[in-house]
């Protein structure tokens, strides 16, 4: 008699991803705009789009989205590191690499996340955005990254958080699903098939 048993694993919990993503996009744009306004009013504005970046808080909405995702999917006691002093890991192509978020569980690395934003007329150019998407797709296809996401949103998204995606492979849902599954595999070490012969 052959019997296979699978461990019961709760369904992946992405929460209300669409609303969380819209909130993160609104946070991105409102933080940039506020930083630009503060610099302008102080008379010490950086050149071009740089004034919206130097405050360093633009991606906090996305960091929050992923922190919540990680905790909802089994790593309630995980350490989610966002302080610069603890974000450096040994690198493959260089001695070290500083990430935006490092997640550990019981002193084991679970995830290293990097958030990038590109703003300006050249990135708004559709051909440049397509090349960026192709780069991200290849990083995933070549297994250099587990997942990557490319979101596009105009400055007017500060009002409603609207965004678009370029492909299923680089969609936010795919990135969140991969991250959630990674958390699950590290929080349920006994998720193996048991065969009784």
Image: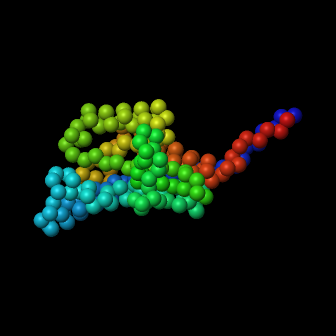
In the rendered image, is residue 111 in sight? yes
Please state the horizontal and vertical placement of residue 117, each as a whole percent of the image. Answer: 31, 48
- The quadrant of the picture occupied by the N terminus is top right
Residue 91 located left or right of residue 123? right
Please state the horizontal and vertical placement of residue 57, each as a whole percent of the image. Answer: 33, 60
In the rendered image, is residue 158 in sight? no
Please state the horizontal and vertical placement of residue 10, each as a whole percent of the image. Answer: 64, 51
The residue depicted at 15 percent of the width and 53 percent of the height is: 47
The residue depicted at 25 percent of the width and 41 percent of the height is: 123
State which quadrant residue 93 falls in.
top left
State which quadrant residue 130 falls in.
top left
Above or below, 24 relative to 193: below
The residue depicted at 56 percent of the width and 60 percent of the height is: 78
Above or below, 184 relative to 128: below
Residue 147 located left or right of residue 58? right
The residue depicted at 42 percent of the width and 60 percent of the height is: 85
């Amino acid at each position: 008699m052959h019997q296979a048993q699978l461990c019961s694993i709760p369904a992946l919990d992405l929460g209300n991803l669409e609303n969380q993503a819209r909130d993160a996009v609104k946070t991105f744009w409102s933080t940039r705009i506020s930083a630009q306004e503060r610099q302008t009013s102080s008379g010490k504005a950086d050149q071009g789009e740089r004034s919206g970046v130097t405050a360093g808080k633009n991606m906090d909405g996305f960091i929050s989205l992923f922190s919540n995702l990680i905790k909802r999917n089994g790593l309630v006691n995980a350490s989610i590191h966002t302080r610069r002093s603890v974000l450096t890991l040994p690198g493959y192509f260089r001695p070290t690499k500083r990430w935006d978020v490092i997640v550990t569980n019981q002193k084991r690395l679970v995830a290293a996340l990097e958030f990038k934003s590109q703003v300006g007329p050249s990135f708004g150019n559709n051909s440049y955005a397509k090349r960026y998407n192709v780069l991200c797709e290849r990083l995933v296809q070549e297994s250099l990254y587990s997942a990557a996401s490319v979101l596009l949103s105009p400055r007017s998204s500060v009002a409603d958080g609207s965004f678009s995606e370029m492909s299923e492979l680089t969609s936010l849902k795919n990135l969140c699903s991969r991250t959630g599954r990674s958390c699950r595999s590290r929080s349920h070490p006994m998720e193996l098939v048991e065969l009784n012969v």
